[in-house]
Image: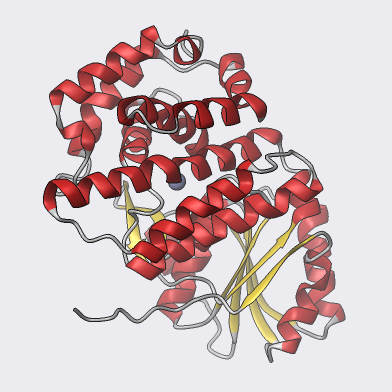
Amino acid sequence: MLVPTISLPALLRIKPGSLGRLGIYLKRDGYQRVVLLVSHGLIESIWSHVERALVEAEITILLREEVETATAEAALELLARIPGESQVIVGLGGGKALDVAKFVAFLAGKPYIAVPTSLSNDGFCSPQSSLKLAGKRKSLGARLPYGVVIDTEVCLHAPRPLWLSGVGDLVAKLTAVFEWRVAFHVRGEPINDLAALLSDSTVHQFLARPAYDIEGMKPLATALMLNGIAMEICGSSRPASGSEHLISHALDQISERPRLHGLQVGMATYLMARLQENNVEVIGELLETTGFWEEIRCDPFVLTEWRAAIELAPGIKPHYFSMLADAEARERLMAFLLSDVRLRNCFV
Ligand SMILES: [Zn+2]
């Protein structure tokens, strides 16, 4: 079997105040001319702080663009305007800007530095870009960032639901890895033990201290980043994403008002854990301790949409092994929605 070529981040800074040192990090690695792609609506104080940090380190910003839409078309339009003399592309802000920046850097063949300002999912360091292409959401191939710089102080000041979304996306690794093992037993799908171990252990590291404070930001950021690396190691999304993600993708398609990725995924993870009869209490209690359930109860989901999403989920990736392909499994999930008190309280 061929050993895949992988590329891993070399520059990692996850600590308070790292945004103000971005210029120093880039300069040390020999970068002097950058393109800065920033989330539309990002707080002015954050991007001006970053610009100051770059200018103070004598880094030239050749192009600064706000990214409004996460589409492949917008990425191509940007690609045409990337100055040839730029040495690195920096994505700053939320998921949309980072997905576009990652894809543009990939197409331009330039190194990419991810600078997320919140921790709402594991996309900032994954080997794909989630973009719309001709109106349909696609996972387009890209490369892992060369650098990941996360200012934990900035992430702590992001809205709390974004952090809860990150917790939901992280805990999904437990059900995803379990399902990967089922896929191996049912149809011999190969497992990469290192990727599975990495994914599993990141959750357990976070479980040791799931706190919403400055110290708690680092293990969550590190865990989400390592999940991206786990995907790169095995060349598939299996260590980070399973049927809980299919349910969330289905909700994105049919919901009148889709919620944050990790809020949908976190709840679907608990639901899948009930089906798998594995880690139910670990996941249920983590979501309790962090205030995840409370957040959902304040803005409940719609029961009929979840029922439809469970039916739709296995068809989203037709050739992908999903425990939801079994009609009886889907029936059991439907029953849990009403019989499990944690889930029942999350619906209008
Ligand atoms: Zn996810």
Q: In the image, what residue occupies the spot 69% across and 92% down? A: 30
Instruction: Give residue 81's position: percent from left, percent from top.
Output: 51, 76
Residue 191, quarter of the rendered image: bottom left
User: Is residue 69 in view?
Assistant: no
On screen, residue 63 above or below 320: below
Residue 192, quarter of the rendered image: bottom left
Task: Give the side of residue 67 with respect to residue 251, left or right.
Answer: right
**Which is nearer the eye, 288 or 241?**
288
User: Is residue 271 in view?
Assistant: yes
Instruction: Give residue 164's position: percent from left, percent from top.
Output: 61, 35
On screen, residue 111 above or below 195: below
Instruction: Give residue 209's position: percent from left, percent from top.
Output: 70, 42
**Which is nearer the eye, 207 or 271?**
207
Quadrant in which the N terminus is drawn: bottom left
Q: In the image, what residue occupies the spot 79% across and 69% down? A: 51
Instruction: Give residue 141's position: percent from left, percent from top.
Output: 34, 66
Q: In the image, what residue occupies the spot 25% across and 18% down? A: 332
